[in-house]
Amino acid sequence: MERITFNPNQCGGKPCIRGMRIRVVDVLELLAAGISINDIITEELPDLEYEDVVVCLNYAVSKLNHPVIKAA
């Protein structure tokens, strides 16, 4: 996930794509709004590559997919 970068002096330290001021959450919000990956990389955020969008999805999954341990 080297495409995801963190810089405390940029975008409040939020995860961004390849050092640009494009936050992971910006990409996820576009996807949630129903915008296709192709439209994101050609119209909405043309500095992105297809792999950047896939990495955003994988990053979100990694943050949400953790085990839940219940006390007996």
Image (cartoon, rainbow, N blue to C red):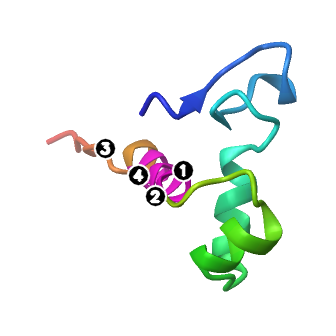
Number of disc labels = 4
From this view, report whether residue 22 is shown above or below residue 50. Answer: above
Is there CB contact under 8 Å for labels 2 and 4? yes
Q: Is residue 60 magenta?
A: yes
| Label drawn at residue 52 | 1
Quadrant of the snapshot with the C terminus? top left
| Residue 17, image x, y percentages | 65, 39
* Placement of 45 over or under 6, stated as above or below: below
Give the distance between the C-alpha atoms of the residues marked 3 and 2, in whole angstroms.
19 Å
- Mark nearest the camera among 4 and 1 is 1
Q: Magenta segment, which residues? A: 51-61
Mark 1: amino acid: Asp
Q: Which amino acid, by three-letter code, is at mark 2?
A: Val
Question: Where residue 58 is drawn, which disc sits there?
Answer: 4
SS of the residue at dot 1?
Answer: helix
Q: Secondary structure at mark 2?
A: helix
Cβ–Cβ under 8 Å for marks 3 and 2: no
Three-letter residue code for mark 4: Asn
Residue receiving disc 2:
54
User: For the point 43% across and 50% down, which residue is it?
Assistant: 64
Q: Name which of mark 4 and mark 3 comes first in the sequence.
A: 4
Q: Which residue is mark 3?
A: 66
Which SS class for mark 4? helix
- 37 sits left or right of 54 in the view: right
For the N terminus, the image quarter is top left
Which residue is found at the position 73% from the left and 31% from the top? 14
The overriding secondary structure of the stretch rendered in magenta is helix
